[in-house]
Structure formats: C-alpha cells, structure tokens
Image (cartoon, coloured by chain):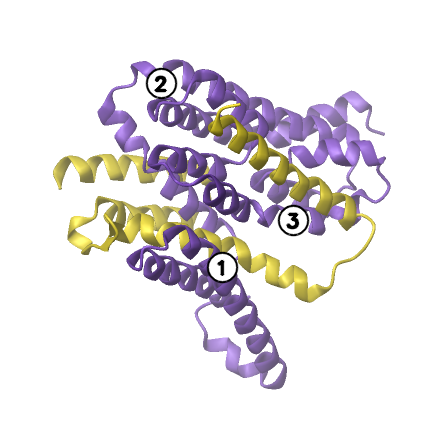
Amino acid sequence: MSPVLLETVLIGIGTYLFRSGSLSLGSRIAWPEGVRTWLSFVTPAVLGALLGPMILMQNNRVISLSHSADLLAALPTCVVAWYTRHLLLTVATGVVCFAVIRYFV
Amino acid sequence: MDTNLNVAKRALKDASPILFAYFPIAVTFGVIATGSGLSFLEVFLISALVYAGGAQFMLVSFIATGESFVATILTTLLVNLRHVLYGTTLGPAFSSWKERRKWAFAFGMTDEVFAVASSRILQNPAVPIYQLPFAGACYLSWLLGTVAGAGIGGIVPAQLSAALSFALPALFLALVFLGKRTFAHFSAALCGAALAILATLFHIGSFGIVLGAVTGATLGFVIQLHRSRTAQNTPTVQSGTPFGE
C-alpha cells in the first residue's frame, strides 16, 4: 500500500472511531460538563493554529500585511463569515477576493 | 401521522442547503488534490474514507509538502478530534437506537450534519428513517463533487487552481465564525495561532499545531470558567462586553 493510501486509511479509521465511539458512548453515559466544555475549545484552537502560519507567514517568516494576498483576502472573508454565517458564500468570497488581490498585488 | 416516505422526503429537504454547499467544495477539493499530483483513485478514497472537508484539504497539503507520516496522521486526527464533541453532544438523543444504526449514522456526522442535526433534534426526536437519509444524501453530494472535481482537475488552468488554494483558509475562517462567538472561543483561536507561528519560527511547525490546540483549548476553557464565575458574582460586569455568551 502506498504511503498516501495508508495515511488515508488510518486517518479514515481514526476519524470514524471519534465519531462512532463518541456517539455510542454518549448515548449511554453523560460526560462531565468540564470535559465537554474543554472539547468545545479544541476546534477554534486547532483552526487558529492552522490559520496563523497559513495567513501570516511565508517561507517560515512572518510577513507584512501589504505583501500577503492571503491576509488581505482573509479580511473580507471574515466579514462575510461574521454577517452571513454561510459556509459556501464565505468560501466563494474568499477565493474570489484572493484571485483579485493576487492579480493586482 | 407522518408516513416513512414523508419523513425521508423531509430529511432530504432539510439536507438540501448542505448538499448545495458540499458539492462545489468537494469539486474544489478534487481539483486541488489532483493538481497536487494525487491519482483519481487516491482522491476518491480520501473523500470516501475520511469525509471531513478541512482534514482532507490539510492532508493533501501535507502530502504535497512532504510532511512526515506520523505528523500528517497526528495533526489531521487532532483537527478531527472535535467530532468527539459532536458524538458526545448528540449521544443522548440516540439512546433508543440499535447499536448498528448508531454506527451507521456516526460515519456521516460531519460539522454541518452535526450543526443541523443538533438544532433539529431539539424539535423532533432522532429517528433512523430521518437521520440516515439525511446523512447519506450529504455523503453522496460530497462523493459526487469529488469525482467531478478530480475528473476536471487535469484541465483546470493553473491560475484558477492557484486561486482555489485559498478555499482551505477560507473554509477554516468560515468554521471559526460559524462556531460559538465568545471572547473565550476567539482567545482559544488566537492563542492557537500565536503558538503555531512561534513554533514555525523555531522550526517545529507540526508540533506547533498540537501545542497550539491543547494550550489554546485550555486557555479558552479557563477564560470561560473565570467569566462565568465573575458573572455569577457580579452580573452587571458582563453587560458592557463586546462578546456575549
């Protein structure tokens, strides 16, 4: 099996076990409130950790605002996400803004 | 009294916003993944087996940049750890279900399916005839979009696929703002971002995501705990803050 397929299968199994194990267990026992609250902060923290380097860095260096098409495109994307709460509209806005900014910057 | 057919129809109608959102995002995924040199079969299997948008885009970018095997799997799974929260939250509504059906529904429990399911379950109890077609239709839309994207991936101009590469950060930004919007949640995200940037500066990038996730989540948790205690003691303090609970 190629490394890509092996990674895919392992991530697939892990993700499925997160989903099924938690649903199966969650239907039998109630988890402590503290655990559930902590888990609810994992998602924004992971997303932040992924976005930070992606938007603010290039070649392992922090870059300035005016030189980053990613950061400039992120601003209107955030505004649309904030006001519409619409997944597709947000992604579409981001991609279009990024394309326009890349063309002009 | 609803017939089974009507319930299933209502499920598909309720799923339609997700179907329309998934298809183009999955097309984008197919285009980007084939553009990074993955084969049609690999791209299809990623969508079929992983079935989690953010994690899939991430996996492809890790493969493209030659990230190590262990870091790729650990980081991607960490991103998907949030699904534990979904199962834990929805669990009680599924207590009367047969075990087999719980495990079938769980496969399709994505961010969006969870978001819609958790709001619907407050109005109607979770029944298999509703939940299974609902989750199944979303999965089908994701697979069809992936196949379409992987099919046209080879003929999409480089300019367009470069622009589409912003779909991933845009998707992550959307998920940040679609989630809870409290001061504590934004603090968790900013802390995660700061630590991941620091880790990248010190050339321990993949570890930075784990570090940022765990530290950020703990910071958010502590802030929320502190704020709810302060709110209990002096209720008026909260009124002027920009972020409501």
* Residue positioned most to the bottom: B233
Give how far across and how far down residue B204 sits, in percent: 37, 55
Give how far across and how far down residue A61 sits, in percent: 23, 54
Given contact means CB atoms under 8 Å apart, are the residues at marks 3 and 2 in contact?
A: no
How many neighbours does mark 3 have within 10 angstroms: few (below 14), some (14-19), or many (20 or more)?
many
Labels 3 and 1 within one chain:
yes
Q: Is residue B9 left or right of residue A68?
A: right
Marks 2 and 1 sit apart, C-alpha to C-alpha, by 36 Å
Give how far across and how far down residue A11 sits, in percent: 56, 37
Residue linked to disc 3: B84
In the rendered image, the quadrant that contains the N terminus of chain B is top right
| Kind of residue at disc 3 | Val
Q: Earlier in the sequence, mark 3 or mark 1?
A: 3
Q: Nearer the viewer, residue A13 or B69?
A: B69
Q: Earlier in the sequence, mark 2 or mark 1?
A: 2
Rendered residue at 82%/24% (across/down):
B3
Mark 3 vs mark 1: give the one in front. Answer: 3
Indicate the chain coloured yellow by its letter.
A
Parent chain of label 3:
B
Rendered residue at 43%/35% (across/down):
B57
Rendered residue at 24%/23% (across/down):
B158
How many neighbours does mark 1 have within 10 angstroms: few (below 14), some (14-19), or many (20 or more)?
some
Residue linked to disc 1: B181
| Kind of residue at disc 1 | Arg
Indicate the chain coloured purple by its letter.
B
| Kind of residue at disc 2 | Gly
Given contact means CB atoms under 8 Å apart, are the residues at marks 3 and 1 in contact?
A: no
Labels 2 and 1 within one chain:
yes
Marks 3 and 1 sit apart, C-alpha to C-alpha, by 20 Å
Give how far across and how far down residue A103 sits, in percent: 15, 35
Residue linked to disc 2: B153
